[in-house]
Image: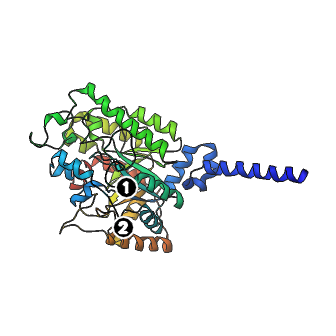
Amino acid sequence: MRCKLSILLFFIISGTSAIAQEKIPNYLQSYKQLYKKDPHQAALKWFEDARFGLFVHWGPSAEYKSGDWVLYDKKIPMQEYIDKAMKFKGEKWSADSICDLAVQAQMKYICYVVKHHDGFAQFASKAGPFNSMKAAAHRDFLKEMAVSCKKRGLGLFIYYSIGIDWTHPFYLTTNYYSAARPHYSKENYPDSFIRFRGKEDFVQYWNYVKTQIFEICTNYGDIAGLWFDPIGGAYANDDLFDMPEIYKMIRRLQPHALISYKTGFDGTEDFLACEHEIKSITALMRSVQGEKTALSAEAAWQKNKAKPAELCATMQSINWGYFEGKQQKHKTPAEVLLLLKNAADNNANLLLNIGPYPDGQIVPADKATLLEVGKALHQKGFPKQDKANYMKLRIATEKNTKLTDRDVETLK
C-alpha cells in the first residue's frame, strides 16, 4: 500500500511539475527563475539577450512582385485587389522552412506580418471575411507559424498594421491622414466603398481591431509580443487611437508579452523599433504631417529612447515585401554582419527582413546569405554590444534633422 501511495505521489508531483513547466513559454525556458517572479521582466531580459530576429513580410501583395505597398503605389482598383487576394494560395509556404532558417542563422525570434496595410489577415478571424482561411489558401498561416516557433523555442512577435487598413470600410479617409487610402480617381474607388463619414464611425474599425488582437492573444498560445505599425495616422488622430486600451488588453491576456509601436505612441511601450537607424522620427513627422504629429513623436521618443531597441533592416535593397526588378539587390553575408555590428554599437537587436516569393518560398539568395551568417556567428559569436556609450548615439541623432531616402521609406 505504501509503495502504491509513493508511486501515486510521484506521478502527482511529476504531473504538477510538467504543468508548471508547460506554463513557461518555450522560448523563455532559460529564464525560469525570473519568470516565476515576473514574467514581463523575464521576457525583457530574454529580448535584450536575443540579439537577432527574422522579419517576414509576405501575403497577397507579393503576387504583384512590386512590394507590400503595391495597392497604394499602383492605385489598383480596390475590388480588383480584394478579388485577387481572395484567390491567394501561398501553396509552397512552409513555416517550418522559415523557422529552420532562423535557427540556422542563430536567430532567437521571428516577427511575422499577419496583417499589413492591405487589411488581409493571415489567420482565422471572426472579425471579417478578408483572411487566409476564407481565401483560396484556406490555411491559418499564423497558427502554422506559432506551432513551428514553439517546436524550435523561437519567440514569435506578431506584426499588425493598426495605423492603416486600406480595405476596411470604416478606416479613416485621406482628409484625416494622407496615406489612409490610395489616392484614387472616383471610378476606381467609388464613395460607396468607404462607409467612414466622420470620427464617430471610427469605432467600427476600432472594434474590428480589438477583436483581431483578442483572437491573436487567445488562439495561438504564448506570443513574444505585438509589433504595431505604422504610427503617423495614430499621432495625427490620437483621440481616435486608444492604444492604452489595446496595451491593457494584451498585458491582461499575455502578461509576459512585449509591446512595440515604432519609437512609441505614449511612451509605455517595451522597446523601440527603428528602421535602418536607431533614432527619433520627430523630424520626419514634422516634415510630412506637421507640428502636432512631431510633438507626439518627440514626447514618446523622450520616454522610450533609453529602452531596449531593435534595428530593422531588409535583405532587399528595394522594399520589404517581395519586389522583382533589375535594380533589386540582396544583401551579402558581409553586409549582414556589418548590420549586426551596427546594431551592437547601438546596444540593439537586429531584426532582418525577408520577402518570400508569391508562392511562399524563400528567395534562394537570402537563404544562402543567412546560412553563411549563421556559420560565422556560430564560429565567432555576435559582435560585443556597447552598453556604455550607446545613448550618445541615440542623443546625437536627435540633432540631425536632415531627411534621407531611408527616412522617407520609414513612412511605409
Q: Which residue is mark 2?
A: 336
Packing grade of label 2 (10 A; few <14, some 14-19, many >=20) is many
> Is residue 124 rendered to the left or right of residue 75?
right
One can see residue 174 in this view? no
**Residue pictured at 31% horizontal, 35% vertical:** 296
Circle 1: is it few (<14), some (14-19), or many (20+) Cα within 10 Å? many
Would residue 22 appear left or right of 257 to someone viewing this image?
A: right
Residue at the disc numbered 1: 311
Work out how far the residue at label 2 is from the one at label 1, CA to CA, in angstroms.
Answer: 12 Å
Residue at horizontal 20 percent and vertical 42 percent from the top: 179
Q: Amino acid at mark 2?
A: Val
Is label 1 in a helix, a strand or a loop?
Answer: strand
| Residue 365 in view in this figure | yes
Where does residue 138 sit, x and y in percent of width and height? 36, 53
Residue at x 15% of width, y 47% of height: 77
Q: How is the image coloured?
A: rainbow
Q: Position of residue 196 (x, y in %)?
A: 22, 31
Question: Where 233 falls versus 69 (above or below)?
Answer: above
Q: Secondary structure at mark 2?
A: helix
Mark closest to the chain's N terminus, 2 or 1: 1
